[in-house]
Image: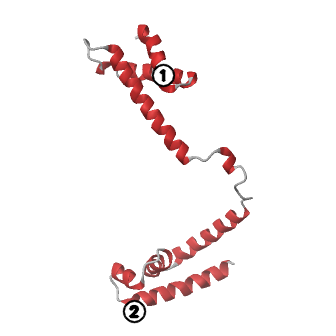
Amino acid sequence: MVALLPRLRRFAHALARSPADADDLCQMTIERALKARTQWQPGTRLDSWMYRIMRNLWIDETRARSRRDQSFAPEEVGANVGDDGAERAALQLEMTDLDRAMNRLSAEQREAVALVLVEGLAYKEAAELLEVPMGTLTSRLSRGREALIAMLGDAA
């Protein structure tokens, strides 16, 4: 394996086209080969096996970089983005109050409110899902809404 290092480095440079990336690729290849040394078949070409490892690592690295480039915007794009946190903190407090109020509703009211008001289901869909008549759903929803308004009115 040591005798192959110059050839592996040349191949890594051909793949990566960057000295730093080539050195990293060469190191990863050696590591992978040492960990998987039991998979090499004696009597077969060690250099071909190592080149295959290196090429597969490079393909994986290229794909990962491509995904990273698609996922992350350049630093300059985010330089002027953000807020002072006050609006986010106020919204978080409101959501906490709403969560508490929702948890204080009866299970039936909570289900009706969650399905219709939060998830946006039609009354008919929600009634079918809960296996209750439309009037029962409407009643639960109405009482749940009134209870939330009362609780959140007290919180404000």
Q: Secondary structure at mark 1?
A: helix
- Give the labeled residue for mark 1: 14
Q: Residue at x 35, y 22 (%)?
A: 36
In this view, 61 is above or below 94: above
Quadrant position of residue 112: bottom left
Which disc, if any, is residue 135?
Answer: 2
Q: Is residue 27 visible?
A: no
Q: Amino acid at mark 2?
A: Gly
Q: Secondary structure at mark 2?
A: helix
Q: Nearer the viewer, residue 55 or 102?
A: 55
Label 1 or label 2, whichever comes before in sequence order:
1
Q: In x, y percent, where is residue 115?
A: 44, 77
Q: Amino acid at mark 1?
A: Ala
Q: In x, y percent, where is residue 153?
A: 65, 82
Q: Are marks 1 and 2 in contact (CB under 8 Å)?
A: no
Q: Which callout, 1 or 2, points to the residue nearer the camera?
A: 1
User: How crowded is the residue under tag 2: few (<14 C-alpha within 10 Å), some, or many (20+)?
Assistant: few
Look at the image and tell me in which quarter the N terminus lies.
top left
